[in-house]
Amino acid sequence: MSLAADFGVTLTQHVLGNQAHHPGARGRFSALLTQIGVAGKLISAQVRRAGLIEVWGATGETNVQGETVQKLDRIANDTFVEVLRRSGCVAAMASEEEDALIEVEPENAGDYVVAFDPLDGSSNIDVSVSIGTIFAIYPRLHPDRVGLDDILRPGRDMVGAGYIVYGSATVLVYSAGRTVDSFTLDPSSGEFFLTRRAIRMPAATKYLSINECNAPYWQPWVQPTLDAIKGRNDDEKRRVSARHIGSLVADFHRNLLTGGLFMYPVDRRTGRGKLRLLYECNPLAFLAEIAGGGASWGGGAILDVDPEGLHDRSGLIIGPAPDVALAERQYHEYRSR
Ligand code: AHG
Ligand code: MN
Ligand code: MN
């Protein structure tokens, strides 16, 4: 190989090569993914300077869900919205940080609608721990109008999803329905280069990721599920260990690559989950299934849930398929008692 050609495949080259294979990914899908990469680079640049410039801390606002808005939440949201609005690829967007559907003016509107969590893991911002951006892409339903029905659809309708994790490196992971591939941002050239092709989630659970302090609020099927998994450890060998960051996107990224089960089950007092279906659970469920894993709300697949509102919350059990199935069996067993 000549030295001049000795560099990797860029994100843009990869999406251009792949879109031809995806029948549902019509229109300017590759342009959209490239623009999501641009938004990711801009947000990454802000994250990397957090603490040096004035982006730590809260804005003083609370969002539609009653949560404190951090300055970086706002910066990430505005960056993502503005880059996608100008891209010409998107007709509407739904964001964790915005109450209502964000409609793009008709002259700029494109073929897709996107739901996103601009910054996941807000509690980790001010302590420089991994955070990320999560996105879900749907084809718009009608050429002449756009509305809530474009986004309030089961996750099965997605044509693409992914995330960008701002960790020890900035890594973009996406799928257009066939494979899950990852790209690492090269800080010197400002390009995302392909670093992992066709990622498969290991079938054996190596890590358990759950906030155990919620144990008093779990439904009765959760503890036996955890006990069954922890019971694989014995005097001979430790097969399972705990890993929990508190940023879903970073927990999922580790679990996707190494084989880990993340659980945030519903609260037994309210019957509600914490994580949001449209821009947290669905996109990661899409990636998990394509990588050979699974994702459930407890009693069934996340991707089959019909959402009612933009900010619906769900239980989430996501990771290696055999243990997602184990959790579902426990759920149904306890429900039938
Ligand atoms: P966000 O920062 O977008 O509001 O999401 C935070 C989420 C998720 O990243 C994480 O797994 C979970 O909240 C942690 O919640 P607990 O502190 O209740 O465990
Ligand atoms: Mn989040
Ligand atoms: Mn968020």
Image (cartoon, grey):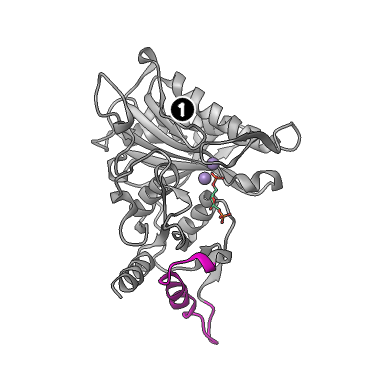
Percent of width and height locating residue 84: 45, 25
**Whether residue 199 can be seen here:** yes
User: How many numbered discs, if any?
Assistant: 1
Percent of width and height locating residue 206: 49, 68
Viewer-proximal residue among 267 and 198:
267
Q: Residue at 39% x, 41% y: name it.
A: 161
Q: In the rendered structure, which segment of residues is drawn in magenta? A: 215-238
Q: Quadrant of residue 327?
A: bottom left
Q: Residues within 10 Å of mark 1 (few under 14, many from 20)?
A: many
Q: Residue lying at the far front in this picture: please name it.
A: 269
Residue corresponding to mark 1: 35
Task: Judge left or right: residue 40 versus residue 268.
Answer: right
Task: Judge left or right: residue 122 versus residue 111.
Answer: right
Task: Judge left or right: residue 290 versus residue 141.
Answer: right
- Badge 1 amino acid: Gln
Q: Residue at 32% x, 62% y: name it.
A: 299
Vertical placement of residue 47 versus 226, above or below = above
State the quadrant of the C terminus. Answer: bottom left
